[in-house]
């Protein structure tokens, strides 16, 4: 019998390879993510975690391999649409100058949608920032800015979040705030996410499954307990 893959998972990554000047950064990465799964990409600095998430968001083009989104070849999806569907949140919030509301409205307005005041209130409530509409972003703490960043990404109604070390630039108190916000989003929206982190305790707090990356190779894929128990260091 011929082996046939149907790529009917939510995200299906097959044989994903990325090289720069012939140097492999990621080698033959294969995994699938189902709707509602909370997946951590865990591994040491330089393992290729950010590269993997950038490839999924089509910020870089793979050297080889493929990605399917709901069975569709991701290259058939216009990049702007792909990036709204898979909302990326990076380490630094990089908010635009202006108010919190300006930042929330920017993404929807870029594709012809206007957020109502009620929608803005709901987004802010979801990240525990009720009443922050007219605050200038320059006045926000690090944790508040990252929560606005999350709300700004959610304003695009993504099907999943791609979070790249969303708390590594924050102090412990701000990190707790952002983790609590991520937990609330998971609970209220059953949000699928891929969370890149090198923080083992964060994996245990937020994820149910771990992809362990080392030197560009996917060396383990399993439940948090299976993968982390088998690994003594970190
Ligand atoms: N533009 C680039 N040019 C050369 N090397 C790069 C580039 N981007 C990433 N790398 C290398 O690829 C490897 C993986 O990087 P990255 O995906 O950022 O790892 P991680 O997010 O796990 O820390 C590292 O060795 C890094 O130095
Ligand atoms: Mg990184």
Image: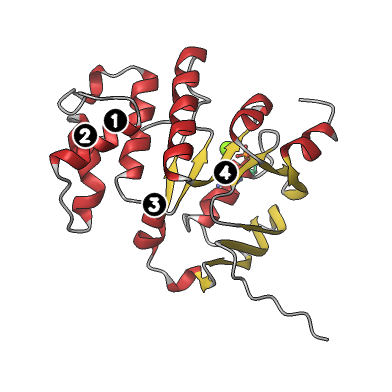
The extreme front residue here reads 188
Name the residue that disc number 1 marks.
Answer: 125
Q: Of label 3 and label 1, which has the lower sequence position?
A: 1
Q: Is mark 4 within 8 Å of ligand 2?
A: yes
Q: How far is disc 4 from disc 1 in space, using C-alphas?
A: 29 Å
Q: How far is disc 2 from disc 4 in space, using C-alphas?
A: 32 Å
Label 4 Cα neighbours within 10 Å, binned few <14 / some 14-19 / many ≥20:
some
Percent x, y for residue 92? 42, 31
In the image, which disc is placed on residue 158?
Answer: 3
Dividing the picture into quadrants, the one containing residue 11 is: bottom right
Give the number of the mark in front: 2 or 4: 2
Q: Residue at x 34, y 33 (%)?
A: 126
Q: How far is disc 4 from disc 3 in space, using C-alphas?
A: 19 Å
Percent x, y for residue 230? 85, 35
Q: How far is disc 2 from disc 3 in space, using C-alphas?
A: 18 Å
Question: Where does the C terminus fall, quadrant-wise?
Answer: top right
In the image, which disc is placed on residue 100?
Answer: none
In the image, which disc is placed on residue 121?
Answer: 2
Q: Of label 2 and label 3, which has the lower sequence position?
A: 2
Q: How far is disc 3 from disc 1 in space, using C-alphas?
A: 17 Å
Name the residue that disc number 4 marks.
Answer: 50
């Amino acid at each position: 019998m011929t082996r046939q893959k149907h790529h009917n998972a939510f995200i299906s990554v097959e044989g994903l390879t990325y090289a720069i000047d012939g140097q492999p950064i990621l080698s033959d990465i294969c995994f699938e993510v189902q709707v509602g799964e909370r997946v951590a990409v865990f591994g040491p600095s330089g393992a290729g975690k950010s590269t993997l998430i950038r490839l999924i968001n089509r910020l870089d083009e793979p050297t080889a391999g493929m990605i399917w989104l709901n069975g569709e070849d991701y290259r058939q999806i216009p990049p702007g649409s792909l990036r709204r569907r898979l909302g990326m949140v990076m380490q630094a919030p990089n908010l635009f100058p202006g108010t919190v509301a300006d930042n929330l409205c920017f993404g929807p307005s870029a594709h012809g949608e206007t957020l109502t005041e009620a929608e803005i209130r709901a987004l802010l409530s979801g990240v525990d920032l009720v009443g922050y509409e007219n605050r200038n972003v320059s006045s926000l703490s690090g944790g508040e800015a990252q929560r606005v960043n999350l709300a700004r990404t959610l304003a695009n109604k993504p099907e999943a979040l791609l979070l790249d070390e969303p708390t590594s630039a924050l102090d412990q108190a701000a990190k707790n705030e952002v983790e609590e916000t991520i937990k609330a989003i998971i609970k209220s929206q059953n949000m699928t996410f891929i969370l890149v982190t090198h923080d083992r305790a964060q994996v245990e707090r937020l994820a149910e499954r771990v992809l362990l990356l080392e030197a560009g190779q996917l060396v383990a894929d399993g439940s948090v307990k299976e993968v982390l128990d088998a690994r003594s260091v970190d």
